[in-house]
Amino acid sequence: MPPSNSYNTLAGKKHSLGPIIAISVLAVLLATSATFGIWAYTSRQDYKDNTDQKVTVAVEQAQKQTAEAKDLEFIDKEKLPLTHYNGPAAYGSIDVSYPKTWSAYVDESGQSGSAAVSGYFAPKFVPTITNQKNIFALRLEVVSSSYSDVLKQFESQIQANKVKVAAYALPKVPSVSGSRVNGEIITGKQGSMIILPLRDKTLKIWTESPEFNNDFDNNILANLVFSP
């Protein structure tokens, strides 16, 4: 018996759907491949752009750091050779070495309050010493108060945790034991102060800003001498 028309029609439909399905699958694969390709290209381009940007930023930072290092090196070289302040023999013949780019004003008249010697040091020029808001790179005083009395003046700051006190001796005068005070040594001023007994008096030397800590430690204190 010959096959029915309905069977032939069904078979024909199956044969005609085959290419369509294949084309559809191929189209989906191509679309997926194209999408992946676009994503991969975009990601690669973003990575390249970000990498280039990071490299540019890194180069600029390195150049800036190099320039800053050279500036600091130049500034440090300009400070040399160190110049000196030599105090009166009656007050221990204090010898202070400080950068030659700084200026100094020292009152040795004994008329500066309770200080027999009162010194002010600052880069370029010394600002008005009567203005309490001015910050000095270095201050020096020989006061008539005893060493213990000077230390007692910091008791409230110690209790308020505004300053830290530690034992200290100058590298070139190790026989004299004193103290180093770090923190808010003066109201509104952060710095470091060295307090040392000097015969019947007390030597105080300090900086009023962390900006000058390097000079204070490496130029001032490293070379400071006096006769106990």
Image (tube, helix red, strand yellow):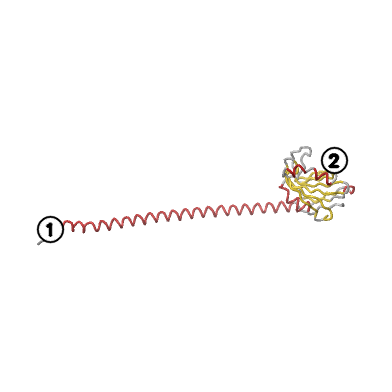
Judged from the image, the secondary structure of the residue bearing numbered disc 2 is loop
The amino acid at mark 1 is Ser
Q: Residue at x 86, y 39 (%)?
A: 111
- Return the residue found at the far left: 1
- Return the residue found at the far right: 90
Tag count: 2
In x, y percent, where is residue 81?
A: 78, 53
Q: Residue at x 27, y 57 (%)?
A: 21
Mark 1 surroundings: few (<14), some (14-19) or many (≥20) residues within 10 A: few
In x, y percent, where is residue 210?
A: 71, 47
Q: Name the side, left or right, on which 95 lies relative to 56.
A: right
Mark 2 surroundings: few (<14), some (14-19) or many (≥20) residues within 10 A: few
- Compare marks 2 and 1 and give the one earlier in the sequence: 1
Task: Determine which quarter of the picture holds residue 209.
Answer: top right
Please identify the quadrant where the N terminus is shown: bottom left
In the rendering, which numbered label is found on residue 124?
none
In x, y percent, where is residue 194?
A: 79, 49
The amino acid at mark 2 is Ser
For label 1, the residue is: 4
Q: Name the side, left or right, on which 66 lies relative to 149.
A: left
In the rendering, which numbered label is found on residue 114?
2
Does 49 sit above or below residue 190?
Answer: below
Judged from the image, the secondary structure of the residue bearing numbered disc 1 is loop
Q: Name the side, left or right, on which 67 lies relative to 101.
A: left
Q: Name the side, left or right, on which 1 lies relative to 102.
A: left
Query: Is residue 136 or residue 141 the one in the foreground?
Result: 141
